[in-house]
């Protein structure tokens, strides 16, 4: 019989209790304590088959002793016996620890582990450093540097703060905002807001690729920029890059124009702010990457979710606000660039849903692992653009001149429906564009008169095809 769980980030199986090589399972104890906690089930093989244990009492005592002697500090854990199909198994539940990092210790060597997918792996140096800060209840952005505020300028920060809040930053605010200590030494957050480029990792690489995949920057990039410096400067430059490499399409309604941007501006801003404030600045030689393709925009930043759990395992509607860089996040909130209470991802979704032409297949995608966090925004105009390209092949300039903007938009929708279903009905295209059937019937009649489309059937059963 299979155990009703699978090996995941929060669950691991062991066929038997290994006492001669306890590292085989104790590294999972370390990883669970350093992350979001987890369950280690003894008496279950790698395929999830319940094989059972012969002496659960003795096994439980050995597990407790080995954790107490080999894991430092000792994590909180609970051992329980479960009976499955008359077979006894032991379930070790390890709580997420506060005194990170939790090390496996043997032969004078200490190693800290983390979970990546369903494996326990040795923590890289930058994650180990982050675990040390977390265990001290400190954050990277709040650490004090050896740089004096008096040696640097903050013109962009002060101008932007006033522009956004209509309030000037006073000298005392640098301390209250967490940008300096009382002696005037900059925190890491303060260094990241200085006009000068003094944090090497404060960089964003932006590329507009030709087509749908990455290639050679020299051969396949339509635009390529590298930005470095102040976080506000990075946000502005990256936002401009996305705008310059996006298109604003539109169609006309009676008396007004409906804009159809490729991406929701507010969603892009939220995604960029998220990348800048929640990224892991401890990772040496790292940067945020913004990659634009014909059909999507990808924003990838160093460092996974701060709570250790993959974002795809979260319910976005109820995701908690756990901030890797709380000082930076608080200042961005004061300048109204972001929400305070962890609603940024929900905002990305809700703003995208407002776009004309949005459908469920275009919902933003969020993905993270232990190393990085990625946001993927779909270009809501990509399919329409592909159809529009076909319009130019199927409709001569002379005929196109006889069609209004709304009629041409109507025709691109017609082509999309034909590709999907092989034909179009009046009702189907009217519902797709949200127009009265009488109006749709009039447009269809004009396209027939121009010999662009043909029809068969009568009345409500009439079907329309490309000529």
Image (spheres, rainbow, N blue to C red):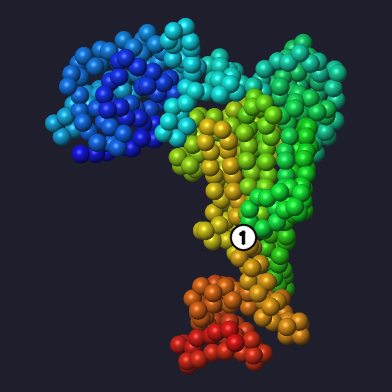
Residue 100 is situated, as x and y percent measured from the top left of the image, at 50, 17
The spot of residue 49 in percent (x, y) is 24, 36
Left or right of residue 113, residue 330 in this image:
right
The residue tagged 1 is 380
Q: Position of residue 252 (x, y in %)?
A: 70, 72
Q: Residue at x 71, y 67 (%)?
A: 250
Asked whether residue 194 is in view, the answer is yes
| Residue nearest the observer in this picture, 449 or 32 | 32
Circle 1 packing at 10 Å, graded few (<14), some (14-19), many (20+), is many
123 or 308: nearer the eye?
123
Q: Residue at x 49, y 18 (%)?
A: 112
Against 170, is 398 above or below? below
Residue 408 is at least partly visible in this image:
no
Tell me what residue is drawn at x 68 percent, y 37 percent.
288
Q: Determine whether, in the image, residue 17 is placed left or right of residue 426.
A: left
Left/right placement of residue 57 relative to residue 173 reads left
Q: Residue furthest left?
A: 86
Helix, strand or loop under label 1: loop
Between 452 and 149, the residue placed more toward the observer is 452
Task: Residue 454: name its quadrant.
Answer: bottom right
């Amino acid at each position: 019989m299979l155990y009703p769980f699978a090996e995941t980030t929060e669950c691991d199986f062991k066929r038997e209790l290994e006492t001669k090589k306890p590292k085989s399972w104790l590294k999972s104890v370390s990883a669970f304590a350093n992350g979001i906690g987890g369950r280690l089930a003894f008496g279950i093989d790698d395929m999830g088959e319940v094989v059972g244990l012969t002496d659960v009492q003795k096994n439980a005592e050995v597990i407790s002793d080995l954790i107490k002697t080999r894991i430092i500090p000792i994590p909180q854990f609970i051992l329980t016996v479960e009976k499955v199909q008359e077979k006894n198994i032991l379930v070790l539940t390890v709580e997420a620890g506060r005194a990170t990092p939790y090390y496996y210790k043997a032969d004078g060597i200490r190693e800290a582990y983390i979970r990546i997918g369903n494996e326990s792996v040795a923590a890289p140096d930058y994650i180990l450093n982050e675990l040390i800060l977390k265990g001290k209840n400190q954050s990277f952005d709040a650490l004090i540097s050896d740089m004096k505020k008096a040696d640097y300028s903050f013109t962009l920060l002060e101008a932007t703060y006033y522009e956004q809040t209509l309030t000037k930053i006073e000298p005392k605010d640098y301390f209250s905002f967490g940008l300096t200590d009382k002696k005037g030494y900059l925190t890491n957050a303060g260094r990241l807001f200085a006009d000068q480029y003094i944090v090497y990792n404060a960089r964003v690489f932006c590329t507009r690729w030709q087509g749908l995949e990455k290639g050679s920057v020299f051969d396949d990039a339509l635009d390529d920029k590298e930005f470095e410096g102040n976080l506000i400067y990075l946000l502005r430059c990256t936002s401009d890059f996305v705008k310059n490499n996006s298109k604003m399409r539109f169609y006309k309604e009676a008396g007004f124009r409906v804009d159809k941007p490729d991406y929701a501006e507010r969603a892009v801003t939220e995604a960029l702010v998220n990348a800048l404030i929640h990224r892991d600045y401890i990772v040496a030689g790292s940067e945020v990457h913004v990659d634009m393709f014909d059909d999507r925009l990808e924003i990838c930043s160093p460092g996974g979710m701060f709570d250790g759990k993959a974002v795809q395992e979260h319910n976005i509607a109820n995701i908690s606000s756990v901030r890797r860089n709380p000082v930076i996040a608080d200042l961005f909130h004061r300048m109204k660039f972001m929400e305070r209470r962890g609603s940024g991802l929900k905002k990305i979704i809700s703003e995208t849903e407002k776009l004309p032409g949005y459908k469920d297949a275009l919902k933003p995608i969020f993905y993270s692992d232990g190393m990085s966090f990625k946001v993927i925004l779909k270009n809501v105009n990509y399919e329409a653009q592909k159809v529009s390209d076909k319009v130019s092949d199927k409709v001569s300039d002379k005929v196109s001149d006889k069609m209004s903007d709304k009629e041409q938009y109507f025709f691109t929708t017609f082509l999309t429906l034909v590709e999907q279903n092989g034909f179009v009905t009046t009702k189907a295209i009217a519902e797709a564009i949200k127009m009265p059937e009488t109006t749709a019937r009039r447009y269809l009649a004009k396209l027939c008169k121009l010999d662009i489309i043909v029809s068969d059937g009568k009345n409500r059963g009439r079907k329309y095809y490309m000529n």
